[in-house]
Amino acid sequence: MDIRQKEGNTKEFKGEGGLGTLFSRITLEGPIVKENLNFLVSGRRSYFDIFFPLIGGELEGTKLSFYDLNTKLTWQINETNKLYVSGYFGADAMKLEESTEEEADSSDGASGSIDFRWKNATTTIRWNHLFNHKLFMNLSGIYSSYNYNFVSQNDNGGIIPSGQTFKWGSGVQNWIIKPDFTYYPDPNTTMRFGINGTLYQFNPAELSNANTNFTLEDLDKDKGLEISPYYEIEKTWHQFSMNLGLRYSWFGNIGPNSVAMYNPDFPSTVNTITSIKDYKKGELIKSYSGFEPRLSLKYNINDRKAIKLGYNRNFQYIHLMSNTAAALPFDIWKPSGIHIKPLEVNQISVGYAYDIEDGIYNFLVEAYYKTFTNFVEYKEGADLFINEHLETQLLPANGYAYGLEIGAYKNKGKLTGNFNYTYSVSKRKTTSKLNQENINNGDYYPSNYDRPHLLNIIANYDLGEKWDAGLFFTYQTGRPTTVPTGRLSFDGNPYLTYSNRNAHRVPDTHRLDISFTYTPKGNPETRWQSSWNFGVYNVYGNKNAFSVFSTFHNDQLKTFEFSVFGAPVPFVTYNFKF
């Protein structure tokens, strides 16, 4: 995907935004030096953390907030040179009060809280140079950072040992340099070529005391370098168009780091380590490379009907290890290396689009099939939490996915909106050469992303000169999960036994939102325009589960769900533009 921020207005100062009970936003743009230097600043901030306690009930113990800030500065140096400086900064926070009894009513109920935080930041400097009317260049330097952490505390026993409060965190940082060229040899041909270089730094995990910030555990950081030259040509012949591209990617896992070597005839554990190899700073530990072709074909049957066919292959050199089925879901990013191969994905897709002659309706149907090689899965009973030898908990896996997407759009008239439905299947199986390690005896099982049914409906209705009504409904099949099926006792300590991997599902999720917009008649003598938006989020108060887990309490097996929005949430927003 190629996502670009809009540029600020070069001629006059403008603004727009909204003030609401759930969140507010504002965008300001305009010239600093007319026609030469302009700016754009856009920000949002939610008030869920303030508003939820006022609603009470199911939402009283939930705190949810986010903010993001977009900035951009554009300098037209001269007719052939332009400089952009942009940045994005955002953070999300979610605090859930946990209870292992019915709202912790009983004296022996266990309670506490889990405080999740996500932070993203990226800054870009981009130089646009026009060589001539056929060739131009974008030279970009980019820094990005992602951090994820949670703080867990417990008041009187339960998921986390009583009295303990800790902070867990991980993150990824990227430094990117990428010169990209675009060349137009003729009106029907576009060529793009260039090279991307990315330096990664991964912080797998850090555990500290939440009150003192004293570090308890800090795993070694991983580093990686990716270099990818590419060439792409896009060409049109009357009703037929083609996009053909080839990318070559090279990835190197680099030191400093210490890597354990294992006996290949036994499962990898700390007891089967044969040696530890130390790598110096900048030393190449392991490298991978491969060609990534892509092809997209489109044929316009007429001006209202078209068919599409596409194929692409991609390599992914970084992997996400996610333990979302646990009471404390956490994510760890790891690069490919000696023990982890890159993920290879091949996909083919075919689609058909049809537009009604007057443009009132559009229809789209598309099918796809994907194959995956070298997934990373975790073993049964894996301990991913602050594990110095994380590779001992992982297994290689292959998989496949396929799906059918249907879309219908109404663009004109009092009633407008769209209907989107997707049926999809996503399966995988582990491929360890030691069969006793394989999950579900090496058979295919649903992946965490196997959610067969997804339905979104959006409708807008013009009620008259000043009023509009809006409706949004979404439904998704519950994600697969592994659940306890029994218990056993060893040396007097209880342990759970589990079903096959992802053999069950959390409850399906669905939600209905409604809104009404009132737009008063504007004053033609001023630039100020405004409107009011009223509505209810999650109208019928469905308790969609964020996390589902099971644990023992008072010698009994209990299963619990964390719900973020478990009640209707009304909102009011005042929108303005000038």
Image (cartoon, rainbow, N blue to C red):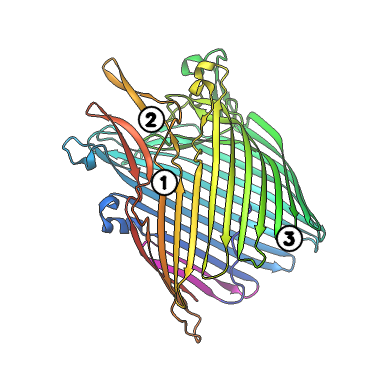
Is 20 one of the magenta-colored residues? yes
Side of 270 relative to 352 (left or right): left
The reply to whether the C-beta atoms of the residues labelled 1 and 3 are less than 8 Å apart is no
Q: Which of marks 1 and 3 is nearer the N terminus?
A: 3
The numbered disc on residue 129 is: 3
Q: Distance between the residues labelled 1 and 3?
A: 49 Å
Label the magenta part by its dominant secondary structure: strand
Residue 271, can we see it? Answer: yes
- Count residues near mark 2 (Cα–Cα under 10 Å), then give few for <14, some for 14-19, many for 20+: many
Q: Earlier in the sequence, mark 2 or mark 3?
A: 3
Q: Position of residue 248 (x, y in %)?
A: 72, 39
Q: Which of 488 and 6 is in front in this view?
A: 488
Q: Which image quadrant is residue 295 in?
A: top right
- Count residues near mark 1 (Cα–Cα under 10 Å), then give few for <14, some for 14-19, many for 20+: some
Circle 1 sits on which residue?
A: 509
Side of 571 relative to 394 (left or right): left
Q: What element carries label 3?
A: strand
Is 439 one of the magenta-colored residues? no
Residue shown at the point (57%, 44%) measured from the top left: 174
Q: Where is residue 369 in the image (x, y as percent from the top left)?
A: 63, 39
Range covered by the magenta-colored residues: 13-35
Residue type at mark 1: give it: Thr
The reply to whether the C-beta atoms of the residues labelled 2 and 1 are less than 8 Å apart is no
Q: Which of 184 and 464 is in front in this view?
A: 464
Circle 2 sits on which residue?
A: 483
Q: Is mark 2 on a helix, strand or loop?
A: loop
Residue shown at the point (35%, 25%) measured from the top left: 485
Q: Which image quadrant is residue 467 in?
A: bottom left
Side of 291 relative to 16 (left or right): right
